[in-house]
Image (spheres, rainbow, N blue to C red):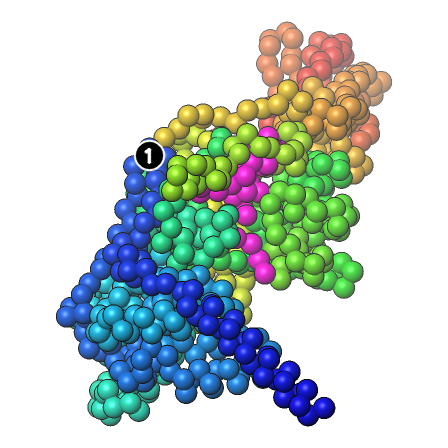
Amino acid sequence: MLFIVICVILSLIITAAIVFSAIYFSAKLDDDKIVAEKATLKILGSDGAEIDCEAFNRYVTYENINSNIINAFVSLEDKRFFTHNGVDYYRLAGATIKNVKYGYFKEGGSTITQQLAKNTQLNSEKTFTRKIKEMKLAHDIEKKYSKEEILEMYLNAIYYGNGIYGIDSACKNYFDKSPAEVSVAESAILAGIVKNPSKYSPINNKDKALERMKLVCGLMKTQNYINEEEYEEALRYEYVKPSDNGINPYINAALYEACEILGVNEKNLLKSKYVIECYYDEKIQNIVENLASSDDFSVNTYGGKAALSSVVLCDNASGGVIACYSSDGINPIAFRRSPGSCIKPVAVYAPALERKAITEATVFNDEKTVFDGYSPSNYKDIYYGKVDVETAVKKSINTVAVNIFRETGKEYCVNKAIEAGISVDKNDLNLSFALGGMTYGVTTKEMCQAYTCFANGGMKRKIGLIRTIKNVEGKIIYKNNEESEKAVFSKETSYIITDLLQKTAQNGTARKLSEVKSTEVAAKTGTVSGGVGNTDAWCMSYSPDYTLCVWYGGADNTDEENIAVTGGGIPALLSANVYKYLPIRNEKFDIPDSVAEVEIDLYARNETDKLYLANENTPYEYKKSYVFSENNVPKEVSPYFNNLSADFSAEKLPDGGVKLRFCVIYPNSYVITRTDLSDGSVVEIYRNENLPLENYYGFEEFTDEQAENGKIYLYNLEIIYASDISANQSVTVIT
């Protein structure tokens, strides 16, 4: 039995050795790939010209790389680099034990030479096969190249995040220095980035980058690359982003979108020979960047730092993102934040209009209310009492939005938001969703996707930066279908939302956009409050040609990172200035034939809670125009103010004087004058002003005791209903 066991074990060992040898010796070093002098990816704008991609990579030789960089990378990535032959077996054994313990590839144990092999010769899959090939290639590289050459090729081949490929570009974009000029602390930051570029980039997350820098500096001191004095000096380092770091935010966003489309990482995408055609408009991109980065539109956090910001501009006709901007290297289309009240048109008012649950003129009571255990608060805890939907949108009233969301059906409303392009977590089905309360928030791209539905008459058109992607043979492997549309909202609903948001842009929370005269603009602001100040400030807007998203906020939701501005402040002001410089094709929104603008009698609405059409006699201050879908417009004419006849009569009294009698119906005031027909003299004999309008109905009597016998008088009654509405009746009497 023991013999059989021994034979089985030997057989397994021999088989494993054969498999290992087959895989090991199958790996062949490709010298043409090991030196990557430049990224081969091309990104083109809408005019076919290549967008400047210098940030990708510029090759630099070992002699021009500061020893601080060499020491930092060796300390962190491969402390026995100068003594091993390509594979560090001590480190590999330790990594293997940990991987067995965790049951998956948690640690790779790769040396710098192995990483060079992986980055230039292999894919990034964590498999035993790739690991075996990596070891073989590392041995081959060590036989053929010196340690200095390996470090040179490695530092030029790795990815540093934010579309930055290679050590020269990393130093330029992160520090505005050459690789020969960077300090100990800056070298440690560069070494720290590589493990997770999106997490440890000083542009993406300065605090985490500096925390990791200190770890690397500690390793450098332990391994005697720096002394105590140099270590302490490095710990005092404070990162300041260069004013011009060369990172094109559009490129950053396009790379992210291409990776999503193709299912690859940025590093491999940059090394591909794909040609990506974007909707990028260089002239408009420059306008957006110059405005968004200017001091006129800068916002500071309560901690005194520059707030983060992002701008995304889409063309409504194609769905293409033609320009975008972001501060501090954040990806302008990828980060997620709470949308605040900007979600209301998408998730509250449009769904309610679709279900005919509301109209622009529908009235709600704005007061502090508890809805199923949830009690929303208005901005600054201001409540307005009875308000119509138009006012609720313009003032961004939270209680009304939650009420409508609840009454329309939160499941229906959330599903309509999903249809419009908003990503929703399963835990988001609650009343706070009406105000932007979401588990993960939204992206600027999703918000543009949703708002273009309104701009395009309810039709959803795919939003994106990329028009086509071609492979090395020139074959199109991806194409944005610009004609693909799906009806999310009716054209009537979309136009009513547009009408409401135009009014919001004229004299509501987004009124700074009223400065735009070249085109009609619809807009909605959103502000998310924090412990102190606000965490997020949005302005979503659209014209017949464009949809524009502007966002400001802090890096996290701490008081120090919060901002004082609201969506109606700098975000709306920046939006207005962007529109002023855009080329205009269409000045006005198309109005569907299936909507109608009619005047409603506000007095009748207040009295009956019902919508009536104003009649020809309705006073001016009790008329208000609203837009309705033709199948939801009120049909009945107001019964109020229909009969302005006062039934004016005069009677000579036996004992002298004249008795006047008349009917008054909801007037503001009335005046009686007496004309002596013998000489034409006119005297005002009675005036009653500022009457209580509510429920004021009935007959009035007045005796003119000054009337003389033997005269012919003409009495005139003028009833004033409003500044431009009055009724006159006259009666003649012989005394």
Residue at the right extreme, as displayed: 654
Q: Nearer the viewer, residue 189 or 403?
A: 189
Res 333 seen here:
no
Instruction: Give the magenta range.
Output: 440-468
In the image, residue 680 above or below residue 28:
above
> Which residue in the structure is indicated by mark 1?
48
Q: Nearer the viewer, residue 89 or 67?
A: 89
Residue 514 percent location from the top left of the image = 44, 37
Q: Quadrant of the C terminus?
A: top right
Residue at the front extreme, as displayed: 3
Q: Quadrant of residue 684?
A: top right
Residue 700 is left or right of residue 455, and the answer is right
- The residue located at (78%, 38%) in the rendering is 609
- The residue located at (22%, 60%) in the rendering is 59
Residue 667 is left or right of residue 420, and the answer is right
In the image, residue 453 above or below residue 372:
above
Q: Quadrant of the N terminus?
A: bottom right
Residue at the top extreme, as displayed: 678
Residue 590 percent location from the top left of the image = 55, 24
Q: Quadrant of residue 70?
A: bottom left
Res 45 seen here:
yes
Q: Secondary structure at mark 1?
A: loop
Residue 636 is left or right of residue 75, and the answer is right
Residue 718 is left or right of residue 611, and the answer is left
Residue 249 percent location from the top left of the image = 36, 51
In the image, what residue type sits under mark 1?
A: Gly
Classed neighbour count for the residue bearing mark 1: other residues with Cα under 10 Å, few (<14), some (14–19), many (≥20): few
- The residue located at (78%, 23%) in the rendering is 635
Assess whether residue 344 is covered by the magenta stretch: no
Residue 707 percent location from the top left of the image = 71, 19
- The residue located at (48%, 40%) in the rendering is 477
